[in-house]
Amino acid sequence: MGINVLFFGSLTDATAVVELNGVAASNTAALQEFLHQQYPALRTARYFIAVNQQMVRENTDLKTGDVVALMPPFSGG
Amino acid sequence: MGINVLFFGSLTDATAVVELNGVAASNTAALQEFLHQQYPALRTARYFIAVNQQMVRENTDLKTGDVVALMPPFSGG
Amino acid sequence: MKEKKTHNIFIEGPIPAQKITDDVQKHSGKTGIGAHSIFLGQVRADAKEGGAVNGIEYTAYTEMALAKMDLIRENLFAKYSLTCMHVYHSLGTVAVGEICLFVFVSSAHRKAAIDACEELVEQIKQELPIWGKEIVSGQVSYWKENQ
Amino acid sequence: MKEKKTHNIFIEGPIPAQKITDDVQKHSGKTGIGAHSIFLGQVRADAKEGGAVNGIEYTAYTEMALAKMDLIRENLFAKYSLTCMHVYHSLGTVAVGEICLFVFVSSAHRKAAIDACEELVEQIKQELPIWGKEIVSGQVSYWKENQ
């Protein structure tokens, strides 16, 4: 199980994938550390984090099955 | 020749005509006095005056060939 | 001396709804446009003494309205960065549910289009010599008053 | 518990211009409506290094966008006196000159329709997780940034 991670917009240029399944991470800070190791270009990218579609600004605990989205600034319309 | 007078909107209920030709009046005040005599219901009506399509707020001299429009508040759209 | 072209804005009867799509499509070749702001006035079945409004009958001092509209257009083009501006207003009878006013403003960016469209609608209502008579029946009608 | 209906706003590819007239006509029976305020986003041929933009490719976090859109809709209905509100946004590729956003707000009076439409457009741009990639050619593209 673990965490489901989604990448959007310009972040997919850094990751070359749009989704990771079954990532082990107990909170968003640990998840970010793992992702920044995996995809160094993410370190300098500006992005927001949503946990289960709710935007979070501070380090947030994660449990198995949670969906974490990494989203660059929106540019719809 | 004289003055050409146009009535618009609800004022035509008071006058039963939309246009008068060849009215003798040397200024807008004199014209209004004449029209209020002719059409008493105009006295209590709220209206603006335009001389040759320019709105006028004060008594304005008229010459033969001028077009004077009596216009109630606009209600387009 | 600058030559001026007067744009007609008046359409006899209701504004055909198809005109909206047709006019939008005419702008697909103007590739600098990023935003269209459109306002439509639709005739309401307001409740009046004697029944509901069935339609509005519009009259205007057309020469003065067109001259005034040209000035409004000129001022808005000077104030905002706009690509196009189109205005159509009905004359004669427009039934309930039909369109009596079509205002269409286009710009590279949304803010100019939206702000100019809003200002244009206000100025059309306040400054153009147009009058509406709300028709309830053959016997009953009321001269419209703008809010 | 209040049941919630999620409205889909996404359309694959460009929004057909004909939809604008069709949607306006669907509202002619709602005789309490006096004003429609419409906003359209059109893809611009912006000049970029490598050439002019040919089109925009839209992607979204659709589930989150739809949930957020429902909240925006609810808040605007609470704030303004509105009859209807409809939003359509493209996904996938939209060519220059085509429509990628269609926002349609109706009310008895112009002020509510115009103010709500403007606020809605801002919120769509700022709060919906949607991304545009400006395509110049097969080799060259730029991630769009909203102003």
Image (tube, coloured by chain):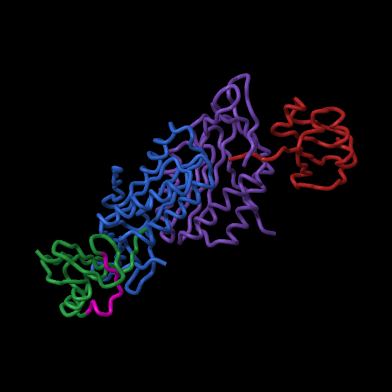
Chain colours: A red, B green, C blue, D purple
Where, quadrant-wise, is the N terminus of chain D in this rendering?
Answer: bottom right
Camera-side residue of C108 and C146? C108
Q: Is B44 within the magenta? A: yes
Camera-side residue of D120 and B58? B58
Describe residue A34's horizontal placement relative to residue B30 as left or right: right
Numbered disc total? 0
Residue at left offset 16%, top offset 77%: B34
Residue at left offset 33%, top offset 46%: C16
Which residue, as the protein is rendered here, is positioned at the far left?
A: B1
Question: Residue D101 occupies which quadrant of the picture?
Answer: top right
Describe residue D84's horizontal placement relative to residue B36 as left or right: right
**Extent of the magenta region:** B41-50
Vertical position of residue D68 compared to residue C125: above or below: above
Which residue, as the protein is rendered here, is positioned at the far top?
A: D139
Where, quadrant-wise, is the C terminus of chain D in this rendering?
Answer: top right
The picture places residue A76, in percent across and down from the top left corner, at 61, 39
The picture places residue C130, in percent across and down from the top left corner, at 30, 60
Vertical position of residue D15 compared to residue D48: above or below: below
Residue at left offset 21%, top offset 75%: B32
Question: Residue D143 occupies which quadrant of the picture?
Answer: top right
The picture places residue B17, in percent across and down from the top left corner, at 16, 68
Camera-side residue of B27 and D42? B27
Describe residue D133's horizontal placement relative to residue D45 as left or right: right
The picture places residue C49, in percent across and down from the top left corner, at 34, 74
Describe residue A10's horizontal placement relative to residue D33 as left or right: right
Residue at left offset 64%, top offset 28%: D142
Q: Is B9 within the magenta? A: no
